[in-house]
């Protein structure tokens, strides 16, 4: 019979385990995108698809807009929304409410026929100027 095979953790081909190198802590100004910074502050995540759409469609979001988006997601969550269309001025966002993730973003030029499917709610983001807000209508009763 042959000798039993033994594995020692931390040893590969007789070499001692190498310490893990820490991840790079220096981030260049271009390394962290504005959206990444905002998602950490406002509690809104943007999927890779949404980030690509925002960039390719030249949609400009500022901290005020992301704050309004976060407030709209809060409203959808309170009403039991799971997949919502959030309207923010001339922009439309499809949002997974439970994970607070923007799935895609459209401006008025990319809406196509203006038909959105597989959503359970629509939320109009309140205006930033604190203008009057139309009361919401609960069709579920």
Image (tube, rainbow, N blue to C red):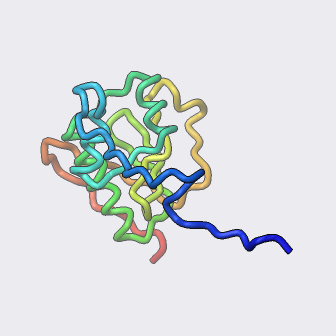
- Quarter of the image containing the C terminus? bottom left
Q: In the visual, does 88 lie left or right of 110?
A: left
Instruction: State the residue at coordinates (41%, 26%).
Output: 55
**24 or 78: which is nearer to us?**
24
Residue 12 image point, x, y percent: 56, 53
Which quadrant, please, contains the N terminus? bottom right
Residue 31 place in picture, x, y as percent: 30, 30
Q: How many labels does the image show?
A: 0
Q: In the displayed structure, would residue 107 be above or below residue 45?
A: above
In the displayed image of the protein, which residue is found farthest to the bottom? 141
- Residue at figure coordinates x 29%, y 47% from the top left: 39
Front-most of residues 92 and 42: 42
* Residue at the right extreme, as displayed: 1
Relative placement, left or right, of 36 versus 101 is: left
Residue 116 picture quarter: top right
- Residue at x 25% of width, y 48% of height: 68
Q: Is residue 19 above or below residue 50?
A: below
**Which residue is rendered at x = 44% and y = 64% of the image?**
98
């Amino acid at each position: 019979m042959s000798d039993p095979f033994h594995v020692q953790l931390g040893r590969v081909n007789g070499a001692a385990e190498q310490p893990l190198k820490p991840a790079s802590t220096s981030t260049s100004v271009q390394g962290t995108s504005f959206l990444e910074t905002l998602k950490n502050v406002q509690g809104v995540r943007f999927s890779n698809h949404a980030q690509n759409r925002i960039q390719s469609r030249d949609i400009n979001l500022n901290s005020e807009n992301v704050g309004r988006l976060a407030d709209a997601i809060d409203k959808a969550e309170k009403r039991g929304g799971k997949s919502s269309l959030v309207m923010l001025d001339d922009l439309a966002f499809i949002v997974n409410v439970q994970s607070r993730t923007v799935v895609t973003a459209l401006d008025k030029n990319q809406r196509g026929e203006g038909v959105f499917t597989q959503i359970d709610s629509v939320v109009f983001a309140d205006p930033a100027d604190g203008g009057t807000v139309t009361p919401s209508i609960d069709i579920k009763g």
